[in-house]
Image: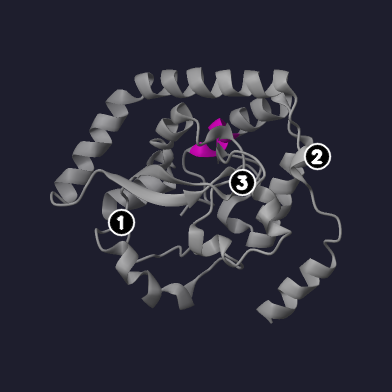
């Protein structure tokens, strides 16, 4: 069934975006980068007390584990980088993943499981409130992520991508985007790709600002976050 679905998507994807068709207006890109830089810098400063509290809680529950979780992700033009998050799982979470893949609750080249047994108690809270994502402001500051853009996939996910899916790698990935403010984990992989391509086709400063404000409203306690 999966192979049929992928084949159908390829057949319906005769038109694919190329890098020169993506909004590369220098004015927009410069403003976007300035917004990313100062937005992430200010965010890191203002949120530093919260970072400290979360770090202490993570260490209290699991003193031997690290506070931050670093994971290789795929960014613009399939360039790999290390993405930062607060650790919300047990230390051997990656080793236990293969045993859980059959329980995946998201269709397509992603893995999500609402009652993932690898998630710690503090991990459930920071995932529900998306606090675990805040260290990605470091990635935004460094320039390998943006405040707004497609979510950066894992390397194992990209290996399953069709040429249609790879269109979402034409721009710098973001901390938030149309997928996050349109349903997040309630949506399947194909819907996420379609929303990302919609963003890439129409992105501009007004759209970025609108997504950021929508993210603020859905950030804490989103029923679609797990």
Q: Nearer the viewer, mark 1 or mark 3?
A: 3
Q: CA distance from mark 2 to mark 3?
A: 14 Å
- For the stretch drawn in magenta, the main secondary structure is helix
Disc 2 crowd, CA 10 A, few/some/many (<14, 14-19, 20+): few
- Residue 33 in picture, x, y percent from top left: 58, 23
Image point (54%, 62%), residue name: 157
| Residue 188 in view (yes/no) | no
- Residue 78 in picture, x, y percent from top left: 57, 50
The answer to whether mark 2 and mark 3 are in CB contact below 8 A is no
Q: Nearer the viewer, mark 1 or mark 2?
A: 2
Q: CA distance from mark 1 to mark 3?
A: 29 Å
Q: Which residue is labeled 2 in the image?
A: 21
Callout 1 secondary element: loop
| 1 or 3: tag closer to the N-terminus | 3
Disc 1 crowd, CA 10 A, few/some/many (<14, 14-19, 20+): many
Q: CA distance from mark 1 to mark 2?
A: 40 Å
Q: Which residue is labeled 3 in the image?
A: 77
| 1 or 2: tag closer to the N-terminus | 2
Report the quarter where the N terminus lies: bottom right
Q: Is residue 122 above or below residue 116?
A: above
| 2 or 3: tag closer to the N-terminus | 2
Q: Is residue 66 above or below residue 210?
A: below
- Which label is found at residue 156? none
* Colouring chosen for the image of the structure: one colour
- Which label is found at residue 89? 1
Residue extent of the magenta highlight: 215-219
């Amino acid at each position: 069934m999966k192979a049929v679905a992928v084949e159908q998507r390829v057949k319906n994807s005769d038109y694919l975006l190329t890098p020169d068709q993506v909004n590369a207006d220098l004015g927009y890109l410069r403003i976007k980068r300035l917004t990313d830089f100062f937005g992430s810098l200010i965010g890191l400063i203002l949120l530093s007390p919260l970072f400290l509290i979360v770090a202490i809680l993570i260490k209290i529950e699991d003193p031997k584990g690290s506070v931050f979780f670093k994971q290789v992700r795929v960014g613009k033009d399939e360039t790999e980088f290390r993405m930062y998050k607060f650790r919300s799982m047990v230390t051997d979470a990656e080793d236990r993943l293969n045993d859980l893949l059959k329980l995946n609750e998201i269709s397509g080249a992603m893995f999500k499981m609402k009652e993932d047994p690898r998630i710690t108690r503090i991990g459930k809270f920071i995932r529900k409130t998306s606090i675990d994502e805040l260290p990605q402001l470091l990635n935004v500051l460094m320039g390998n992520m943006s405040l707004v853009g497609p979510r950066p996939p894992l390397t194992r996910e990209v290996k399953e991508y069709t040429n249609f899916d790879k269109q979402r790698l034409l721009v710098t990935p973001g901390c938030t985007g149309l997928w996050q403010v349109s349903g997040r984990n309630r949506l399947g992989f194909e819907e996420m790709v379609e929303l990302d391509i919609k963003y890439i086709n129409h992105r501009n400063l007004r759209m970025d600002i609108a997504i950021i404000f929508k993210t603020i409203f859905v950030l804490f306690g989103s029923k679609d976050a797990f």
